[in-house]
Image (tube, helix red, strand yellow):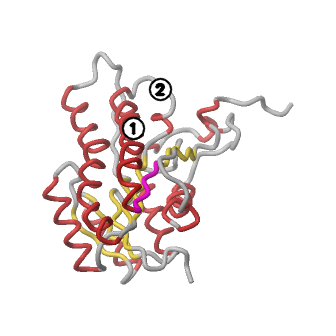
Amino acid sequence: MARLDGTIALLTGGARGMGEGEVRRLVAEGAKVMIGDVLDAEGEALAEELGEAVAFVHLDVSDSASWAAAVKATHEAFGPVTLLVNNAGILTQAPIDTTDEADIRRIYDVNLIGPFLGIQAVVPDMKAAGKGAIINVASAAGMVPMPMIAAYASSKWGLRGLTKCAAMELGPYGIRVNAVHPGAVRTPMTAGAPEEMFEVYAVPRIGEPEDIGAAVAYLASEEASFIAGIDLVVDGGMIMGPVPQPA
């Protein structure tokens, strides 16, 4: 028996990149997964490739009506949601004093308000079941300050706080809430970053989507049944900084 048999997941931003890696791992572990994304062609293609355990729904995470429709689609395809993975996120790089107001608001809408709305959307299913898991995919930039990405980083610090508040409020209902904080991961968002940038860290490589998928699958499983409100950093040691290199 796979460790996620019987799990019905709604996963945002799952059409490509890090989210795709998470989808593939959850399916391999026995879960049924509804991919929610605004990338319709990519999401539909991935669902078709992975077969009957996966479906796709168009989901704008910043819109509560879109969330309601996604939960309804999940019910129709698989049943009530027992796992939510808030993976969708966007990034803009700019100095803090010249970051465009529209970019700030859009980043907060997707990276912080989106997960808040997602939690609200799935909690009725989980309370009715008396159990559930919510995993917020934050960032290493939500653990340590980083320049040139103030809007993104502050949204992830906010998501970290939301995770802990939700873990306290929802724990009595059997719902575990945790956060995963990836470092640099090989996705379209990091395309073009030179590989040698990552050779100075404790794990001298860029992360792969599979690394984050493994962390998400663990926190979703019964193996993590006594874990709530944590920050699971999956960054190859990046936030520790460069390490002494062998002579």
> For the stretch drawn in magenta, what is the main secondary structure?
strand
For label 2, the crowd category at 10 Å Cα-Cα, with few meaning under 14, some 14 to 19 and many 20 or more, is some
User: Which of the 4 quarters of the picture holds residue 156?
Assistant: top left
Residue at (36, 35) in percent of width and height: 158
Tell me which label, 1 or 2, sits earlier in the chain. 2
Residue 38 drawn above or below residue 116: below
Residue at 25% x, 43% y: name it: 113
Name the residue carrying label 1.
161
Q: For the magenta stretch, what is the residue range? A: 174-179
- Circle number at residue 146: 2
In the rendered image, the quadrant that contains the N terminus is bottom right
Q: Residue 66, relative to residue 236: is it above or below?
A: below
Residue at 25% in and 31% down = 104
Q: Position of residue 62 (x, y in %)?
A: 20, 48
- Tell me the amino acid under the disc marked 2: Met
3D distance between C-alphas at marks 1 and 2: 18 Å
